[in-house]
Image: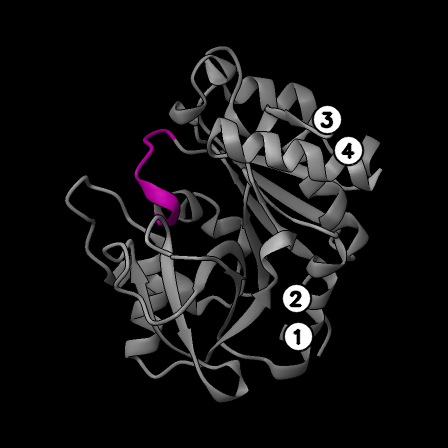
Amino acid sequence: MSEPQRAVVLAAGRGTRLGELTRDRPKPLVEAGGRPLLHWILEGLRQAGIQEVCLVIGYLGEMVRRSCGDGSAMGLRICYREQERLNGTGGALLTARAYCGEEPFFLCFGDILLHPPGHYRSMLEDFAAARPDALLAANYIDDPAPGAAVYFGPGRRVRRIVEKPPPGTSSTRYNQAGAFVFTGAVFDALDAVEPGPRGEIELTAAVARLLEEGRIVRAYPVPADDWLDIGTPELLDRTDRILREAT
């Protein structure tokens, strides 16, 4: 079975924790290593063999359109979908449902980079070889409390995923890393989950639903140093330093 050649990148967020840096630009266009983080992500996807990308945009979305265009300058074909209401990562993915169709696809967050970029191809190869219902990257971290704790066992089969567990309570040190390969089963799962207290539909809930249904979800472990985030000024400084040292 061939590897997926389509990807969806969630690039709708503002990034309020970055303060003035995102006052006049969307979070994925914040620069690290001399260029917008979104451009690094798109280059990694292109190197992995991805040919088409759907960018889900929202806050200052026209800036993303101007920055990335139709993708031809990057060796990609890029289209856009608008997330009119910021209703969670699952809600963002649902805006690209028609684009994804029935074929497996790569999904990643526009503010998180796997580096070196070989991880993107490795994830696609892992998916093509094992053919699970979903593959998710899981980064090694001191405590997954700010994100989602990922529990997996033999064969890297995920047993459980817990959104924002209380600090110090997780017996796993793996965190959902913001990169996935999904089949169409994820959309059925998203249809079945209830929005959270803030009215948001989260991907974590959809993954949990897949597990409840007995679907096969595999983890792709990512070393701590290979997961780059720009969610806070401190994380942005770290990402900028690592990318500059690598070039």
- Inspect this view and state whether residue 147 appears: yes
> Which residue is depicted at the point 44% across and 59% down?
175
Task: Measure how far apart labels 4 and 3 are at the Cα level.
Answer: 10 Å
The amino acid marked with disc number 4 is Arg
**Mark toward the viewer: 4 or 3:** 4
Verify CB contact (< 8 Å) between mark 4 and mark 3.
no
Task: Measure how far apart labels 2 and 4 are at the Cα level.
Answer: 24 Å
Q: Give the range drawn in magenta.
A: 84-90
Percent position of residue 46, x then y: 77, 48
Residue carrying label 3 = 35
> Which residue is depicted at the point 48% across and 46% down?
96
Q: Is mark 4 on a helix, strand or loop?
A: helix
Mark 2 is surrounded, within 10 Å at the Cα level, by few (under 14), some (14 to 19) or many (20 or more) other residues, namely many
Residue carrying label 4 = 244
**Mark toward the viewer: 2 or 3:** 3
Q: In this view, does 80 lie above or below 4?
A: above
- Mark drawn on residue 123: 2
Q: Which of marks 4 and 1 is nearer the N terminus?
A: 1
Mark 1 is surrounded, within 10 Å at the Cα level, by few (under 14), some (14 to 19) or many (20 or more) other residues, namely some
The amino acid marked with disc number 1 is Asp
- Mark drawn on residue 126: 1
Task: Measure how far apart labels 1 and 2 are at the Cα level.
Answer: 5 Å
The amino acid marked with disc number 3 is Arg
Q: Is mark 2 on a helix, strand or loop?
A: helix
